[in-house]
Image (tube, helix red, strand yellow):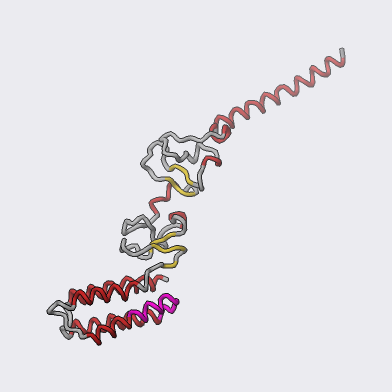
């Protein structure tokens, strides 16, 4: 009798503790059902999962759904759903301003060299990948097209001198001699302005040549 009574008293003490433990597990599970079940919740069926209701294994490369009720809302990287408005893209070319945007805005480390001009190439790892050697070729082509213009009065020797200046600037830029390249480019601009002032080239044509070089200057100054 004593043995049975002792076991009964022990079970009577343990039973409430087991009941409390079971209730606690039910409560916790009810608060985070998807995480406990390891479920992947995708209500809007866009292939990206609700960050709050899905297990960590559901994410592909850290991408989650910002709004799982609307398949038109973009996903977020590493859970920054509320911060996508901080990704600055003034020229709307889908690449973001590195100086003004959080790091998670970048795709594969690509940033915008100049967020005010959609024609300027993006940069990898923050280094502008501008095609420097293309600039002298582009300027020469533009000058050749202007030769037939009656307002163009720059002789062959002067044209050669202008192109040589740009070629030296491009080589310096490729070799990361930034200051040398910038000095050469500013020399080019001064020469074009001098021809504009002398009436050897129209203001419109001269400004177009300068604008082509100005993109290169902006890129170099951002490095």
Q: Residue at x 32, y 56 (%)?
A: 92
Q: Is residue 84 above or below residue 36?
A: below
Q: Position of residue 7 (x, y in %)?
A: 82, 18
* Residue with the most extreme left position: 150
Q: Residue at x 41, y 40 (%)?
A: 67
Q: Position of residue 14 (x, y in %)?
A: 74, 24
Closer-to-camera residue (14/74):
74
Which image quadrant is residue 28 in?
A: top right
Q: Residue at x 34, y 64 (%)?
A: 120
Tell me the chief SS of the magenta region. helix
Q: Is residue 157 left or right of residue 132?
A: left
Is residue 181 part of the magenta span, yes or no?
Answer: no
Which image quadrant is residue 69 in?
A: top left
* Magenta span: 166-179
Closer-to-camera residue (11/176):
176
Q: Position of residue 76 (x, y in %)?
A: 44, 47
Q: Is residue 41 above or below residue 88?
A: above
Q: Residue at x 48, y 35 (%)?
A: 41
Which image quadrant is residue 27 in?
A: top right
* Residue with the most extreme bottom position: 157
Q: Is residue 54 left or right of residue 174?
A: right
Is residue 178 part of the magenta span, yes or no?
Answer: yes
């Amino acid at each position: 009798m004593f043995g049975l009574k002792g076991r009964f008293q022990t079970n009577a003490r343990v039973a409430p503790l087991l009941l409390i433990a079971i209730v606690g597990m039910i409560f916790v599970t009810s608060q985070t059902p998807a995480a406990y079940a390891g479920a992947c919740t995708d209500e809007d069926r866009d292939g990206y999962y609700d960050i709050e209701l899905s297990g960590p294994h559901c994410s592909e490369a850290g991408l989650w759904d910002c709004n799982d009720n609307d398949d038109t809302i973009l996903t977020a990287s590493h859970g920054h759903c509320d911060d996508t408005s901080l990704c600055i893209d003034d020229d709307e070319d889908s690449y973001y301003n590195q100086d003004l945007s959080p790091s998670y805005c970048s795709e594969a480390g690509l940033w915008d060299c100049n967020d005010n001009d959609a024609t300027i190439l993006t940069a990898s790892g923050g280094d502008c990948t501008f095609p420097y050697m293309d600039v002298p070729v582009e300027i020469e082509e533009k000058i050749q097209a202007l030769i037939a213009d009656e307002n163009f009065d720059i002789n062959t020797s002067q044209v050669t001198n202008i192109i040589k200046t740009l070629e030296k600037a491009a080589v310096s830029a490729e070799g990361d001699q930034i200051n040398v390249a910038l000095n050469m480019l500013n020399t080019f601009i001064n020469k074009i302005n001098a021809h504009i002032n002398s009436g050897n080239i129209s203001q419109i044509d001269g400004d177009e040549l300068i604008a082509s070089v100005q993109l290169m200057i902006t890129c170099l100054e951002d490095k």
